[in-house]
Image (cartoon, rainbow, N blue to C red):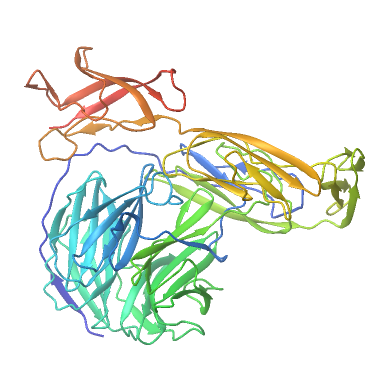
C-alpha cells in the first residue's frame, strides 16, 4: 500500500453567529415484544431531556421497494447532473446538485419544508473552476456556518455560505491539492468525535484519499493517499458507516461491476485495510451507492450506469461488516444513466432519496412511504396514546427527540403482532336491510370485526365483509388546506362507476392545485352517492432571525422576516429601553441598523409584528421577540 501525506493551503472566512446550546437527550422507552392484532399497546417513555417528541408506529422502511417519480428538470437548471446531497436547515429543505454540462455549476433547489415536495425554487451557483469533471458534493455546518465541498477533477473546492444556505454567492476557495489526482469522485465529509474528516477516490487512478481538517472545517487539512487497497476499478460513489463500534467504507467500481469494502477498525483515523467483495451476485455497472441502518436493519442501493438505467439493492443480513448479496430491482422513476444517490433522508415517518440522471438532465425522487396498519400513524406527545395494529407482522416503533436540533436523537424498537384465529363471512344485503356485525346492527357496506375473547393467547375474530346495495359511499377526506406548490389528489374511484365533478370532469380522481369547494357525484348499478370537501388557503406564518450583521457585505445586512401566505404586515423595532427605532408595513424592506442615518450600536433589540394570512383574512396575528445586532 502506498501512502502520501500532503498539507495544502486554504482561505479562512469567519462569520458572526449566535448559537444556542441544547441538552443532550437520553432516549429510552418500553413496549411489549409481542402483541395481537387489534390489541391495545401501551408505551412507557423513559426519555430524559429533550424538547420535542415524534412517535411513528408504522414508518417507511428502506428495506421495501421504493416508489420512484422522475420530476424532470425544474427550472431547466440541470445539465448532465452527477452528484446530489440533501440538507435541512431548520424547516428549510435544500438539495444541491453538481452539473458537468457547460458551464459547470451547482444547482441549489429549495423543496419547502419537506423533501416530499418537488422543488419550488432554484438557483445556479457558479464556481471559479472550469473543469467539466465535476463530481461529489457535500454541505456541512460547523460552528454556526455552512460550508460546501465539491470535487473538480484534480482538486476540491470549498464554498463558504456563512450562516445561511440562502447565500447566492458563497466564497469559493480552491483547496490547492498538489498531489496529482485525476477525476476526483465520491466525496464524503463527516465528523468523528471532534475531528472533521473527508474521503474521496480517484476514478482514473483507482485510489482512495483521506482529508483531515482537525477540529474545524476552516483549518488547513492534510491529505493522505491510501492507494488502491480495495481492488478499485474506476471507483465512484462511496459511503462511510459505523456499526458496532467499527468503521467501514463501501466503494462502487464501474469497470469491474464490483463493490470494495475498506475497514478502519474503531476509528476513521486508523490506517485501513481493504478488499474487493466481487460482484455479490447481481452488481452491474455501479456508480451511485447509498446505505442506511434503520431500526437495526441494514439496506443499500446502487445505480446501474447505463442508458436503459436501473437500480439494484444490497442485502446485509449481518450488517455492513458481514456477508453481502445484490440484486437488480429495475428501472424505478425513468432512470437514464443514473449517476449517484443523495442520502436516504428520514422526515417523520417517511424516507426520501434522490438520483441524478446524467443522460436526460433530470432527477428521480425515491420515497419509502409509511404503512397504514396502525390505528394512529404518529404522535407528538411525550407519552403517546394507546394504539393497535390491524395486520400481523413485525413493526418498527420509532421515537425521534429534538428533530431538526443540534442534539437530535432517536430510538427504534420492534414489536411482533400475532394474528388472531379468524372467521371470514361475505354478506350482501339489499336496500333498507340491516345485519348484525361489529357489535351492532349495520346498514352500510364495510368490513366489521367481532372479537371472541380468549382465556389465553390472542382472541378469535369474526370478520364480516358486508355489502349494502342501497347507496354508494363516497369519501373525499376531510376539509384541509393547500400551500403554494402543493397538490392534493381527491379519489372517488369505484370499479365500474361513472363520475361527475364540479367542473364537469368525468375522471375517478381530481387533482387540486388551489383553494376552493370540490364535489363529486358517483353512479354505479343504479345507485348514486357523492361527497364535498373544502380546500382552504395555506395558513399564513412568519419566521424571524435571531441576529443580523449590517456590515455591507451583502449577507444578513437587514433584519426582516420570511413569510408564507401573508396579506398584511406591520413591524416595529425598539431599543432595550423601549424607544421606537423603526416601523414598516413592508416585509421585504427590512431594518438596516440605523436611525435617521445614525448607526445603532451592537446590542439586543426587540420587535413586535402584526400580520394577516390568506387563510384567515381579517384576523390579526402577533409575534414579538428579541434579536442581536452584530457589528
Residue 59 percent coordinates (x, y)? 58, 53
Q: Is residue 91 left or right of residue 98?
A: right
- Residue at image coords 29%, 75%: 271
Residue situated in front as seen by the camera: 561 or 403: 561
Residue 93 percent coordinates (x, y)? 37, 48
- Residue at image coords 22%, 84%: 2
Viewport quadrant of the C terminus: top left
Q: Quadrant of residue 96?
A: bottom left
Asked if residue 463 can be seen in this view, the reply is: yes
Q: Is residue 489 left or right of residue 263?
A: right
Viewport quadrant of the N terminus: bottom left
Extreme-left residue of the structure: 597
Residue 281 drawn above or below residue 502: below
Residue 245 percent coordinates (x, y)? 43, 65
Residue 138 percent coordinates (x, y)? 29, 60
- Residue at image coords 57%, 36%: 381
Amino acid at each position: 500500500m502506498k501512502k502520501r501525506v500532503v498539507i495544502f493551503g486554504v482561505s479562512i472566512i469567519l462569520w458572526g453567529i449566535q448559537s444556542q446550546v441544547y441538552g443532550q437527550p437520553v432516549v429510552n422507552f418500553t413496549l411489549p415484544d409481542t402483541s395481537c392484532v387489534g390489541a391495545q399497546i401501551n408505551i412507557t417513555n423513559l426519555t430524559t431531556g429533550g424538547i420535542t417528541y415524534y412517535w411513528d408506529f408504522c414508518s417507511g422502511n428502506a428495506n421495501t421497494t421504493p416508489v420512484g417519480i422522475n420530476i424532470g428538470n425544474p427550472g431547466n437548471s440541470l445539465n448532465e447532473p452527477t452528484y446530489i446531497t440533501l440538507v435541512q436547515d431548520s424547516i428549510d429543505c435544500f438539495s444541491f446538485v453538481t452539473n458537468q454540462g457547460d458551464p459547470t455549476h451547482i444547482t441549489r433547489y429549495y423543496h419547502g419544508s419537506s423533501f416530499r415536495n418537488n422543488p419550488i425554487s432554484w438557483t445556479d451557483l457558479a464556481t471559479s473552476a472550469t473543469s467539466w469533471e465535476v463530481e461529489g458534493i457535500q454541505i456541512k455546518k460547523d460552528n454556526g456556518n455552512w460550508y460546501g465541498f465539491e470535487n473538480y477533477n484534480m482538486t476540491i473546492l470549498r464554498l463558504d455560505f456563512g450562516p445561511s444556505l440562502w447565500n447566492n454567492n458563497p466564497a469559493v476557495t480552491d483547496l490547492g491539492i498538489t498531489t496529482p489526482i485525476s477525476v476526483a469522485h465520491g466525496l464524503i465529509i463527516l465528523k468523528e468525535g471532534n475531528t472533521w474528516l473527508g474521503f474521496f477516490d480517484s476514478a482514473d487512478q483507482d485510489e482512495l484519499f483521506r482529508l483531515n481538517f482537525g477540529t474545524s472545517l476552516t483549518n488547513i487539512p492534510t491529505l493522505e493517499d491510501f492507494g488502491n487497497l480495495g481492488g478499485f476499478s474506476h471507483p465512484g460513489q462511496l459511503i462511510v458507516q459505523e456499526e458496532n463500534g467499527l468503521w467501514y467504507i463501501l466503494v462502487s467500481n464501474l469497470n469491474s461491476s464490483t463493490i470494495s469494502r475498506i475497514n478502519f477498525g474503531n476509528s476513521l483515523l486508523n490506517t485501513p485495510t481493504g478488499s474487493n467483495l466481487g460482484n455479490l451476485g447481481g452488481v452491474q455497472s455501479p456508480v451511485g451507492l447509498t446505505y442506511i441502518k434503520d431500526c437495526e436493519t441494514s439496506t443499500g442501493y446502487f445505480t446501474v450506469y447505463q442508458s436503459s438505467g436501473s437500480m439494484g439493492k444490497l442485502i446485509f443480513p449481518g450488517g455492513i461488516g458481514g456477508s453481502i448479496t445484490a440484486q437488480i430491482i429495475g428501472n424505478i422513476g425513468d432512470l437514464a444513466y443514473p449517476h449517484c444517490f443523495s442520502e436516504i433522508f428520514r422526515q417523520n415517518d417517511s424516507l426520501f432519496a434522490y438520483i441524478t440522471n446524467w443522460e436526460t438532465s433530470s432527477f428521480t425522487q425515491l420515497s419509502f412511504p409509511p404503512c397504514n396498519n396502525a390505528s394512529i400513524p404518529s404522535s407528538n406527545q411525550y407519552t403517546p396514546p394507546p394504539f393497535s395494529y390491524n395486520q400481523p407482522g413485525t413493526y418498527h416503533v420509532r421515537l425521534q427527540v429534538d428533530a431538526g436540533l443540534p442534539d437530535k436523537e432517536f430510538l427504534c424498537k420492534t414489536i411482533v403482532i400475532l394474528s388472531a384465529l379468524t372467521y371470514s363471512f361475505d354478506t350482501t344485503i339489499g336496500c333498507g336491510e340491516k345485519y348484525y356485525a361489529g357489535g351492532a346492527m349495520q346498514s352500510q357496506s364495510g368490513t366489521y370485526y367481532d372479537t371472541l375473547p380468549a382465556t389465553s393467547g390472542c382472541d378469535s375474530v369474526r370478520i364480516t365483509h358486508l355489502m349494502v346495495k342501497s347507496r354508494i359511499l363516497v369519501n373525499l377526506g376531510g376539509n384541509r388546506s393547500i400551500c403554494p406548490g402543493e397538490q392534493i389528489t381527491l379519489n372517488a374511484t369505484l370499479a365500474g362507476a361513472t363520475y361527475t365533478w364540479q367542473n364537469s370532469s368525468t375522471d375517478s380522481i381530481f387533482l387540486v392545485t388551489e383553494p376552493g369547494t370540490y364535489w363529486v357525484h358517483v353512479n354505479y348499478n343504479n345507485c348514486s352517492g357523492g361527497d364535498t370537501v373544502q380546500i382552504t388557503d395555506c395558513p399564513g406564518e412568519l419566521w424571524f432571525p435571531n441576529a443580523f450583521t449590517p456590515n455591507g457585505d451583502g449577507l444578513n445586512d437587514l433584519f426582516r422576516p420570511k413569510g408564507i401566505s401573508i396579506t398584511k404586515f406591520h413591524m416595529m423595532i425598539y431599543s432595550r429601553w423601549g424607544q421606537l427605532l423603526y416601523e414598516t408595513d413592508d416585509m421585504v424592506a427590512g431594518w438596516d441598523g440605523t436611525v435617521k442615518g445614525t448607526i445603532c450600536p451592537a446590542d439586543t433589540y426587540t420587535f413586535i409584528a402584526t400580520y394577516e394570512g390568506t387563510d384567515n383574512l381579517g384576523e390579526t396575528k402577533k409575534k414579538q421577540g428579541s434579536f442581536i445586532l452584530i457589528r
